[in-house]
Image (cartoon, rainbow, N blue to C red):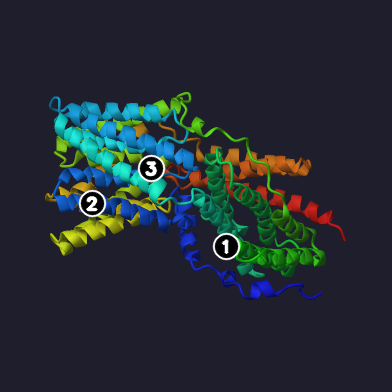
Amino acid sequence: MPDPAPAPLATLPLMRRRPDSMLRWVARRLELRSFGLVPEHFDLAEGLRAALAVGAPLTLALASGLSVLGWSVFAAFWTCLCDAPAPDAVRRRMLGTFLGAGTAMAFAGSALAALWPMAGLLLGPILVFAVLLACGRIAYGGLLGTLLGVVAVVAVGFPQGLHLAGAQALAFLAGATWAFLLITLLWPIDALRPLVRASDAVIVRLLDMAESLVSLGEGPHRDGAWHSEHAEHRRTVRLAVERLRSLLDRYAVQTTGLAPHHQALATAETLFGALIALDQGFIEQVGSARERLAVARACRTALLAWMHDRATPPGIAEPAALPWALRRLHALARGLRDDLCAGCTLAMAQAFAAPVPPTAPLRAAGGVLRARPLSRAAVQQALRQTAGLVAVYAAALTFGLGYPYWAAMAVVVVLQGGVRVTWARCLERILGSVLGGLFASALLLLGGAETVPLACLATLLAGVAIALRAVNYTVFVVFLTMLFVIVTAMLHPGEGIAAARMIDNVIGSLAALLAVFLLWPDFGASLPGRIAEGIAANRAYFDAVSAARPFAEIETVRRAAGLASIEAETALHDLGGLINRTSGAMAHAQGLGTLRMLAGTAAMAWHRRLGENRSV
């Protein structure tokens, strides 16, 4: 039977393979080692806005010769950094809280630190401890607490009398207010853009998974035997789906505009299940290679069509690519002989045709900043930060650090969780600071004392840093370090600024790592233990499919199985995994292949049943 409508796909420029496949290949390997790289999260609009936010007060500071206006520059940058994904009402409240509390912190930290010698050594840890406890009672208040902690340690690093401390606070208030008005009033950006990017990231990773199956042809699947990158596509899709899910939770107070993203999440979950089954079919060479390839190609085409229709501006043209791809899927399913291939094809078609799933009840916007019970983990985190700061200030006295507040800042931003997160951020912070410091030194050497070129460069660096902040932490720190070094060199000239920034960040990062090692260290279960937990979770998924449990229950246990598998696989490569490798636990690593085999077998069983029940 001829294709009923082949025309739509013939003219689609987005049907060609995207050029960033290699970058996502790198991302898959970094994710396995707890380092994030999400190129889809690059935001040019936010970067341009941040460049304006920083460039205006920087120009004023250089033109007036008032170095105190450097506080306006950094306040504007920190305010842009505080603008995290959330509904507009929540963003305004968070930014307003940062503006007010940051101004108070800039004044109090500076004024109190000047009361007696060495006051800052005691005051810095106390202020950060108080800030973290306060923000620990706010939903999604982690970033707010981190940035207020940064303001606190920087203010303590500039002890001033009441008048000068007041001038610093006013400069901070001016810069933060300017950025606040720019973000909320003068240059607003659609609050749902992060959801669009997160949905796109899920789709493109599903596309990579389908493309990898198409590229196999009739050859053997690499995952037929366990290897260090085993099940990379299953892992990266699950992580992308969970990022989208967590973002949707942050938008629970939003009243409109969420339906397409809930639909994208539901569609992606169903497509993912079908691709897992098809992936296992390729591994075990179930059915004919021709039919498996036909299903993989049809899935790839449908995903490309979905991407095209999502990219089509509303009102310009009626989406035509995806309906064509759906007809193609249904036609293919009718001609397939293998039940697994037919079931996967039908599941893919049903995924695109499914209704929007019900969403959770809305919460009041005011409830986001309403105080909540303080958790034990939040108190432990605050105590770790305090201990890390004490260690940093002790190192500053011992080694005579020129800019100890930079080391203190490193403690605050690196120590963001348990051992795994802190270990990864420590390495990224050190690498980013060293690279950024070297680049900044070279630029200062080439630029000399020319203020205008350096000011333009600093403005550009601020924009690039904000645009990349959600893409990769190391790259963000590179541009952040260059920005801070160059602005400091212009407003507070001194010798060895770049070198001091590098050294201080290394010391602060290591202090954060030491704190998380010594205070309530949590390396998690051993590698064999995590593998055993993963096998149990995947067996529960298999048992749910075998017992023909309801679809919603099967989806829940499949998600749990995927997360347990990722936890076990990541544990092999993080700091605990390095310890495991030296203790001989690598002998258990083959069990990781069992995790994915159980999940694939369960997915095949469910989709084979769907194929058996298809109408003929």
Does 407 appear above or below 215? above
In this orientation, which residue lies closer to the viewer: 329 or 362?
362
Residue type at mark 1: give it.
Answer: Pro
Q: Secondary structure at mark 3?
A: helix
Return the disc, 3 or 2, that comes first in the chain's sequence: 2
Residue denoted by label 3: 82
Q: Is residue 145 visible?
A: no
Q: Is residue 55 visible?
A: yes
Residue denoted by label 1: 313
Left-right relation of 109 to 400? right
Q: Residues within 10 Å of mark 1 (few under 14, many from 20)?
A: few
Q: How many marks?
A: 3
Residue 113 sits in quarter: top left
Label 1 to label 2: alpha-carbon separation = 37 Å
In this orientation, which residue lies closer to the viewer: 584 or 474?
474
Residue 13 sits in quarter: bottom right
Return the disc, 1 or 2, that comes first in the chain's sequence: 2
Q: Residues within 10 Å of mark 3 (few under 14, many from 20)?
A: many
Pointer 3 with pointer 2, Cβ within 8 A: no
Does 596 appear above or below 550? below
Label 3 to label 2: alpha-carbon separation = 19 Å
Say the numbered circle drawn on residue 255: none
Residue type at mark 2: give it.
Answer: Leu
Residue that lies at the very extreme toward the right in this rendered image: 616
Residue type at mark 3: give it.
Answer: Cys
Residue 164 sits in quarter: top left
Q: Residues within 10 Å of mark 2 (few under 14, many from 20)?
A: many
The picture places residue 284, in percent across and down from the top left corner, at 69, 59
Q: Residue at x 60, y 60 (%)?
A: 314
Q: Secondary structure at mark 1?
A: loop
Residue denoted by label 2: 58
Quadrant in which the N terminus is drawn = bottom right
